[in-house]
Amino acid sequence: MRKLLISLACCFVFCAANGAGPQLIPAPVSYTPMQGSCMNKNNVLVEVALPGFLKDVLKMPMFMREEAYRLTIKSSGIKIEALTQTGVYRAKTTLEQLKAAGGPLPCCVIFDYPRFRHRGMMIDESRSFKGLEFLKKQVDAMALLKLNVLHLHLTDAAGWRIEVPGYPVLTDSVAWRIGKSYFDWEKAGYPFASARNPQAYGGYYTAGELKELVAYAKARHITIIPEIEMPGHSMEVNRAYPELACVDESGRQHNFAWDLCPGNEGTFKLIKAVLDQVMDIFPSKFIHIGGDEAVMKDWPVCVNCRRRMQEEGYTDIRQLQGYLMRRVEAYLLEHGRRAIGWDEILDSGMSKDAVIMSWRGISGGEKGSAAGYDVILSPSTHCYLNYYQDLIRKEPAACGELVSLRFCYGYEPLTPAMDADHILGLQGNLWCEYIPTPEHAEYMLYPRMFAIAETGWSPAARKDFFDFRNRAYWLCGILHDRGYRTFDLDGESELARSGYQRFEQLEASKK
């Protein structure tokens, strides 16, 4: 039955979306149909920086110009116009989707460009390590969706995933744990292990593997932003190097501490070594340095932290987080990079060069943009893809509220309280406490990442959920044929289809 439905969807792939265009995700800015069809699909002429096309895009912001394209399909062949190779590539991904239906291409003109400059996807590699081939596969899907940023969460308490010269224990020991499931590891008391242990789960990326991934993504016009979490979510560092952990007056080292020790100069030596490695591997001008959920439980009793507070004239223990984050940001700025941090860094006194990633709802985006910070929106309410996408009783383990495809698609990033000039874009985040395998990760990502992609690229006025759902159904079939595991839209519950999060909302809507 599913194959039949996919075939039917393909038969209608070129039906207009409310009279506006073919079944493409994300929906293009403009689609103009013409008479006839193109049989010679491989006759593609590429023309870059034509004066006529330049005139059409000259008034756009630079980021729009760089990705803009015009795709003209005539019976005689296909023409792509763009100002940059990125624009050419975006046109080719549109063409790839059109060709996926098979048969001749309908003659048309598509003029297209992005709404936001940052259209991202985050994958948590610390809590479940999925490997290089998995990441390459997701880069391929991202390219098809015109996403342009892969955010890799490479370090967290559950595992360190990048080799660092001079700090071998990070990969010899705390890249491996006992417990494939994050919660099995947690229940067992957070045991780490060496790779030689037959029960060990985990792994890490060598510098060569990450450079290979960077090149693979670059060829698909995708930037990789690495994240090194600090000062919270850092128990693995304290376990690897207990001499860096907080220490109390009795001399006891707190090597199960959640946070890095901002009073220990060794902490900053390690951070600099890590960032040197990161900057050598990743050319991205942005480096994510975390900044969320520091518990600060050990700092008040730490002799080094208390000494640091006295030296800096601090009266509040929370000022130590700002001290650490500002020092790290300054180091990045010295090397021509900009820091990104979760919205807690708004309280850290960082420079306006820092970028706020707003995850605790939208308030961080409103407050940050109004204060002059650039902002990336990834509110857990709509953009956390580790949340349930259908009824708990029918879905694999997840967390949070119901974030169905329709609910995710309904997210509008801009609010009146935001300074739109400082909103870089949005991002879908996949945290992996409940997601131990690559197959499960893909099931949670798609098709909700389709919704993130369309919200980030297409004009807000072009969005139409019911049209989008038909297109998402079709694209799920394409991904399925390419070896991806996606959520089954056929079995979606009435509640999920409605876009509500609770049954009482659904019932009220029927009255």
Image: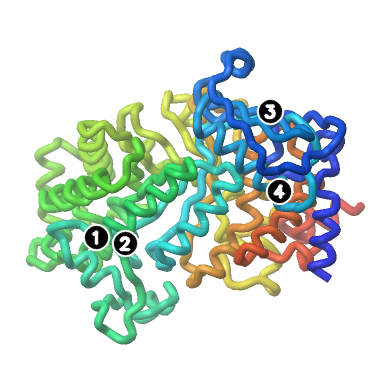
Residue 415 makes an appearance in the image: no
**Hey, what amino acid is under mark 4?**
Lys
Left or right of 462 in this view: 422 = left
**Secondary structure state at the residue bearing disc 3:** strand
Question: Which of the labelled discs sits on residue 205, or is there none?
Answer: 2
Circle 1/circle 2 CB separation < 8 Å: yes
**Secondary structure state at the residue bearing disc 1:** loop
Residue at the image point whose x is 58% and y is 14% from the top: 51
Residue 177 in picture, x, y percent from top left: 32, 76
Circle 3/circle 4 CB separation < 8 Å: no
**Which residue bears the numbered disc 1?**
163
- Residue lying at the far right in this picture: please name it: 511
Residue 85 in picture, x, y percent from top left: 50, 32
Measured in 3D between alpha carbons, the distance from the residue under mark 3 to the one under mark 2, in whole angstroms, is 40 Å
Q: Quadrant of residue 48?
A: top right
Mark 3 or mark 4, which has the lower sequence index? 4
**Which residue bears the numbered disc 3?**
111
Q: Quadrant of the N terminus?
A: bottom right
Measured in 3D between alpha carbons, the distance from the residue under mark 2 to the one under mark 4, in whole angstroms, is 35 Å
**Hey, what amino acid is under mark 1?**
Glu
Residue at the image point whose x is 78% and y is 65% from the top: 490
* Label 2 crowd bin: few (<14), some (14–19), many (20+), radius 10 Å: some
Residue 21 in picture, x, y percent from top left: 79, 37
Mark 1 or mark 2, which has the lower sequence index? 1
Question: Which of the labelled discs sits on residue 422, or is there none?
Answer: none
Circle 2/circle 4 CB separation < 8 Å: no
Q: Nearer the viewer, mark 3 or mark 1?
A: 3
In this view, the residue in front, 33 or 28, is 33
Left or right of 433 in this view: 70 = right
Measured in 3D between alpha carbons, the distance from the residue under mark 1 to the one under mark 2, in whole angstroms, is 7 Å
